[in-house]
Image (spheres, helix red, strand yellow):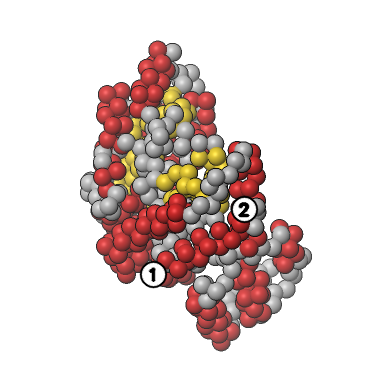
Amino acid sequence: MINLMDGFTLDLPEKEKEKAFQKMMELLNEVETSLEEMPVYHGKTQREIYELFARELPERGEPIAAVLNEVKDKIVPHSTLNIGPYYQSYVMSCSNHAGFMGQIISTFFNQNATKWHLGSVSAELEQLVVRWIKAFMELPADSAGVLVSGGSAANLTCLTVARNEFLGLRVKKEGLYGQKPLVLYTSTEVHYCVVKAAEMLGLGSDYVRKIAVEKDLTIDLIALQQKIEEDKAAGLRPFCIVASAGTVNTGAIDPIDALADICDREELWLHIDGAYGGLAAGVPNVAAHYQGLSRADSIAVDPHKWLYVPFEAGCALFKKEAQMPATYSHLPDYLVADRTKEERRDFMEYGFQLSRSDKALKIWMTFKVLGAEKLKSAIDQDIEKARYLGASMEASDLFEVVATGPLSIVCYRFNPRGNDFSEERLEALNQQLLDRIEEAGKVFITATRVWGKLSLRSCFVNHRAQQRHLDFTFEHLRQLALELI
Ligand SMILES: Cc1ncc(COP(=O)(O)O)c(C=O)c1O
């Protein structure tokens, strides 16, 4: 028996929907205009947040207005405000208005950016914004790319192609059985997602050579060359160098041109992890650090970092376009029936995913509304912010700067002048300071280790942070530090 309920839908009644749209936008706008006064972090325990939401599965729904009230009461005060001016942690941007609107519009249209005829605008915009990203980075126009979820995905996307190109495409069929180990070279400062990619690709993390670094935390070229020789002599197969164009710890940029020379000589793939710093390559004040970038075989960059685009948006770039479908294309019957003589780019052939959210619109709107010049100025300003905060730390007698790089990170620690604290005591004091910063919830700062020392780390991918927020940060940290001794 057919039981079709005509008129049944999950949609809200017209009036309720209209009011809810309005209420949602009013709420977001209210938050947006209060970012400066709101705590960047809630300070609640895991249990407290859990208890806010832990309810049985609802059998019946409730009005959207009631749920939006819950959003106001529970989501708004407990979200980490990386969109606000007091966030300076990890490598995360504060987003931008045009990108945010692009994200909402993309979500509304729910395009599947996989086959051209499912999202023709998405497919064309994706090709366009990849071209714009290359132009922004001053890369040659003939390279190509694909949008992915982020830097980790971009690195994996690139390294998969690197492995396949090195071994030959037969590896897609035959796997790695019987192969001599392939060796990947990078520095001790590499982002862990590169190691993860090597694990996922069956290369094995034992064959990721983390080469020692120089004083400026860039890869030691002599140690690298020696290791390559050693591995060749041991019958292993060097296949790839991964250079960091902005390490996550300090923003160090490896000597790309010199690494490209080694790759040419040794016939290795040169991949650049530019998830953090790649998009700064065309910023005049730092461009010199990126010499040789156009020689790379592949580059991972992250528009959700230094293009200030909301999550998620990464980009995998390749010198040779045909290498992407060579690795990723599969054409099952049900996905090719629409193919005509007309040229159509189906992005399902350019990466791992089949269903893909549209990521191009928010990048397109960001470039259109802000323009490359202003975006480069924002990057430049972020770099200045790290320098400014570093200078305040340096000038005080409470903190020491442990490391800075050419980009927007400064690492520092509480180490009062003239004290005779042991390294253990300094470690404990800085851990306490870090905990107090989080408890206070006024600025969001995390830590890393530089040369083994626990160091607080401020990273600016935040056009909303102004000088007054940096001054506040310094004063706040100074006060908290003084309470420790
Ligand atoms: C240098 C570097 N590589 C890779 C990543 C990973 O990027 P994502 O978090 O977008 O996956 C990051 C993240 O901060 C990074 O800084």
Q: Nearer the viewer, residue 86 or 362?
A: 86
User: Which quadrant is the N terminus positioned in?
Assistant: bottom right
Three-letter residue code for mark 1: Ala
On screen, residue 160 above or below 12: above
Q: State the mark number for residue 75.
A: none
- Using residue 349 as the reference point, say whether residue 203 is left or right of it: right
- Using residue 415 as the reference point, say whether residue 226 is left or right of it: left
Q: Residues within 10 Å of mark 2 (few under 14, many from 20)?
A: many
Helix, strand or loop at mark 1: helix
Three-letter residue code for mark 2: Leu
Residue located beneath label 1 in the image: 98
Helix, strand or loop at mark 2: helix
Task: Point out the frontmost of discs 2 and 1.
Answer: 2
Residue located beneath label 2 in the image: 433
Q: Position of residue 245 (x, y in %)?
A: 37, 43
Q: Nearer the viewer, residue 58 or 66?
A: 66
Q: Position of residue 88 (x, y in %)?
A: 49, 58
